[in-house]
Amino acid sequence: MALPSPEPVSGFPPAPLANPVLAALTGPQRAFADVRGRAARYRPDVAPFAGLPLDPTAGDWADLAALSGPGGSAVLAGPRREAPAGWETGMDLPGVQMTGDALEVAPDPEAVRLGPADVPEMLELVARTKPGPFLTRTIELGTYLGIRRDGALVAMAGERMRLPGATEISAVCTAPTARGQGLAARLVRAVGAVIRERGERPFLHAAASNAGAVRLYEHLGFVVSRELQFVGYRAPSIRAAVSPAG
């Protein structure tokens, strides 16, 4: 896949999108963050993502370890960062970030706003379709819309990371029995309408290997703006975190 140069895309400032988790947690979503020094992470029941500067120091990693707890996990998004000794690397997923200035947004008459009472059904749909992380309090991050058929939730999409001037569309998924009906595209446009109403720009992330999803988003008007890595780290255990001199 040919990528454009990492210059600002259609008016986006480069810094927030280059480091989206930290931009969200030190900006519009500060209320969902645990912060220590220059490290931040979403509360564990909200999202698994953590943020560090693009050039983290040993002290930044130590602050993230303190936020994560001994042996705790954190997922970083952006350019790859090399962790100090004692950290373990698990998931290492190449991804793409796509910006949606050309997305044609439109409310959907069949889409309904999902709330806390819908979370068990949303978690079940996510478990079946695996669009990415969605936890018990993820719904608090923004607007989530769904489509029901015969009373059952068959498709959904919503807002996750909210940066200064931009919001991520996430959790786009459709039950196998309802695929091929364009529901995902309709919900992306409907969530995009909510974002545009606030005067913000939509963007999203996708696994680089998910060619079908990338093609769908390109068809809707999104463009790939940068490659990035989703890397899962496990903080040092209590034993590993203790200095030999101690």
Image (tube, rainbow, N blue to C red):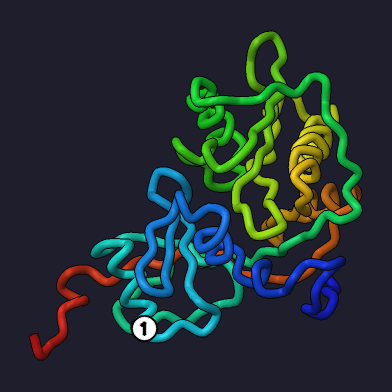
Quadrant for the C terminus in the image = bottom left
Q: Which residue is mark 1?
A: 84
Instruction: Name the residue at 54% across, 22% down.
Output: 118
Q: Is residue 66 above or below residue 196?
A: below
178 vs 163, nearest the viewer: 163
Q: In screen coordinates, is 60 left or right of 201? A: left
- Residue 75 lies, in percent from the top left, at 47, 62
- Say few, some or many: other residues with alpha carbon within 10 Å of mark 1 (under 14 / 14 to 19 / 20 or more): few
- Residue 103 lies, in percent from the top left, at 88, 48
Q: Is residue 135 above or below residue 215?
A: above
Looking at the image, can residue 26 be seen?
A: yes
Q: Is residue 217 above or below residue 119?
A: below
Instruction: Name the residue at 81% across, 64% down.
Output: 224
82 vs 180, nearest the viewer: 82
- Residue 120 lies, in percent from the top left, at 48, 25
The single residue placed furthest to the bottom in the displayed view is: 245
Please, what secondary structure does the residue beneath circle 1 have? Answer: loop
12 vs 239, nearest the viewer: 12
Quadrant for the N terminus in the image = bottom right
